[in-house]
Image (cartoon, grey):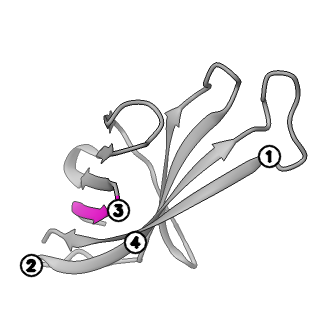
């Protein structure tokens, strides 16, 4: 997969393929308004390409926050091409201080649109 830039409601992501860096910007994301992740791993499956990064390893109450990106499988293109994807912000309550609740996760999804660069 090549480099890409995608935007959605209150979130933007930019992946640079040559150094495997992901920059995430957003309002109301856990952690900071802008975070940079190095040596990002992409996983391919039957539903496309996924990227997962940890936004916050543990809040004061033990909640872990992750960002999963689901992107279409692509071939490198010689020119820029439009693409879509989905950002899934996951709150993991399985290690909550005082014990995990019956439901261990909550999800917020955001549609993404943008460009894969050739």
For residue 1, which quarter of the picture?
A: bottom left
Pointer 4 residue: 85
- Viewer-side label of 1, 2: 1
Pointer 3 residue: 9
Residue 105: x percent and y percent? 73, 49
Seen at 62% across and 25% down, the residue is 58
- Viewer-side label of 1, 3: 3
Which mark is first along the chain, 4 or 2?
2
For residue 99, which quarter of the picture?
A: top right
- Viewer-side label of 4, 3: 3
Seen at 44% across and 30% down, the residue is 31
Span shown in magenta: 3-9
Locate residue 71 relative to residue 91 in the image: left or right. Answer: left
- Viewer-side label of 1, 4: 1
Q: Badge 4: few (under 14), some or many (20 or more) residues near its Cα, within 10 Å?
A: many
Contact between marks 4 and 3 (CB within 8 A): the answer is no
Pointer 2 residue: 79
């Amino acid at each position: 997969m090549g480099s890409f830039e995608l935007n959605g409601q209150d979130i933007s992501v930019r992946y640079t393929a040559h150094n495997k860096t992901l920059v995430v910007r957003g309002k109301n994301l856990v952690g900071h308004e802008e975070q940079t992740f190095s040596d990002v791993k992409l996983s391919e499956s039957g539903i496309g390409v996924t990227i997962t990064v940890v936004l916050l390893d543990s809040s004061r109450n033990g909640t872990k926050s992750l960002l999963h990106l689901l992107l279409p499988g692509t071939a490198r293109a010689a020119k820029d091409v439009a693409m879509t994807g989905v950002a899934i912000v996951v709150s993991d309550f399985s290690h909550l201080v005082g014990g995990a609740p019956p439901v261990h996760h909550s999800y917020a999804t955001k549609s993404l649109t943008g460009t894969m660069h050739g």
